[in-house]
Amino acid sequence: MKRWGLIALVVVAFGGLGWLFVPGPAAPPFPADLGSVEVVAKLVEVPPGAVFQRELYHYATILRYEVVSCRRGGLTPGTLIHVAHYDPWKPRAEAGDARVGALGGTVRSFVAGDRHRLALVSPLDEHYMGGLVDKYFGQHAGVTYWALRTDAE
Amino acid sequence: MGEANVSLSSGGGKPFSVQQFLKGFASWCAQRPRCRAMANRFTLLGLLGFACLAAAAPPAEVGALATEVRSLGWVAYSARSPRGDWEIYAMRPDGSDVRNLTNSPDTEDFYPLFSRDGRQLLYRSMPRGQTVSGNDYGRQGRLMLARSNGAEAKALGGDGEWTWATWSPDGRQVLTLQPKGFAIVELATMQVIRTFPRGGFYQQPTWSPDGTALVGVSNGFGTGWSIARLDLATLRANAVSVADCCTPDWSASGDRVVFSRRRPHGGENGGYGWTELWQAQPDGQGATLVYAEVGRHLYGGHVSPDGRHVLFTGNLREDGDPANQGAPMGLLRMSDTPMIAEHPPLRKVYPQAKSGPTLALPAGHEPCWTHSPAPGLPR
């Protein structure tokens, strides 16, 4: 009796371990032609108050990145760019809605120092019409990009 | 508060202090659960009694205010009908003589806007069952144009077109706001006569009475919800207010902008704080409180055509709650402002504010006022 119990325990333990290592659903491949710019960039910081949970209102927040490499769009490594992320408190795969259309990515939350693979478009006004949190207001005059896809790199 | 020391001793004994006694009693009571519970009940009963007295005996000034505004034209607003769909209603400004202008049970009709002469009405319409959004109502469904009594309604464009439409001062043109920018359309010819970039404006544009500018909600001034003014000749924009703001409207003379503004808060009301009604000059100078409450967000400020009164909605939820019933509307005199609904902590914030009458009106969303008799004419 004891032996059967031990066998059952081992089976359950190995089954559980196996379940832990079963890969989850794979993220859809990064589209080759999404947006006009595709970069790998490091998230420089997440300014205080830039990301907060709001159930009743949607908003986008502007985050600053340093370009690491550029696949499309002609940005040089080391360039600082400003990127608007819609409802940044949500995982990127769940952020899109009827208001802004399809958004996506594997990033679940924004952490300073993380590297992201980004598909971007500009100008922001043509792609997003809504509340915008800009902790860099007055500090940047260049293009602000709209993030269509944000994958962890 | 001064010291409440009352000496009851006649000789050299220790004087009796009312404050000391109350402090001692409170401390003694706090250690006894039954006493504490009873004290809580007394406090609650006291507050309830005060609220009942306040509600049951409206001051005579409220009646005077109702009489003052009763014959001053019509207020259009959207509200749920007894069938459950949203309709456009008109009522006298005192809340009387309510009439359904749209009578269309198969659609949700919302966001009414009288032309400044009060002869025409814009509103939006979408199939029944869709939810009116507190953020996006200006771009939901399709734009409808009707006489101001609801007659001869016709659609202008299709779903999602002519978004955030607002009247020109003469009622001959409509300005719309879309992602690609502003467009001005001549209604007689349906031709777009001017387009220009929106420069961060994204909702609730309103054309000034003199036609030279517009105000709207902008994301171009560092905060997500700023009120800004756009000069239509130079296309230069300036901030009117950069606290979380929305639902701007012009005063009748165009020298003030009335808007909703979030009071700085320490996280109360679930982190949302409360929204107040404010006004400022179009250049952002001279910002002053119009009206504040604790317990309701004040949105949808709309100044009467003669500039003497202002309409608003008093919302329990901060988005105006259009998905449910809307919120009770209210009306007050501009001459009574800055004004607050009495509440001790709010009085500390605004010690100079007045306490005037507010006229409670039916539940609705986005009220709009004309002095024209046209909305009351038979269809």
Image: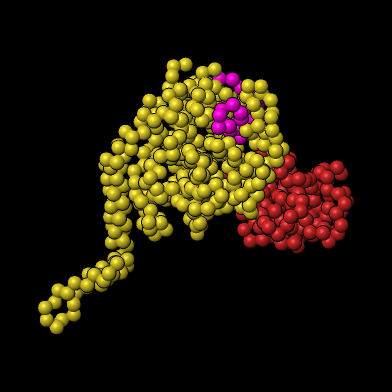
Chain colours: A red, B yellow
> Image height check: is A87 above or below B134?
below
Q: Place residue B212 in its image quadrant.
A: top right
Q: Position of residue A57 (x, y in %)?
A: 59, 45
Q: Position of residue B256 (x, y in %)?
A: 50, 45
Q: Residue at x 58, y 42 (%)?
A: B215
Does residue B169 appear to the left or right of B184 in the view shown? left
Q: Position of residue A28 (x, y in %)?
A: 80, 44
Q: Is residue B210 magenta?
A: no
Q: Position of residue B130 (x, y in %)?
A: 58, 30
Q: Residue at x 65, y 28 (%)?
A: B185
Q: Is residue B129 visible?
A: no
> Image height check: is B305 above or below A90?
above
Q: Is residue B156 magenta?
A: yes
Residue farthest along the bottom direction in this orientation: B12
Q: Residue at x 48, y 33 (%)?
A: B368
Does residue A91 appear to the left or right of B314 in the view shown? right
Magenta highlight range: B153-174
Q: Is residue B187 visible?
A: yes
Q: Residue at x 61, y 52 (%)?
A: B223
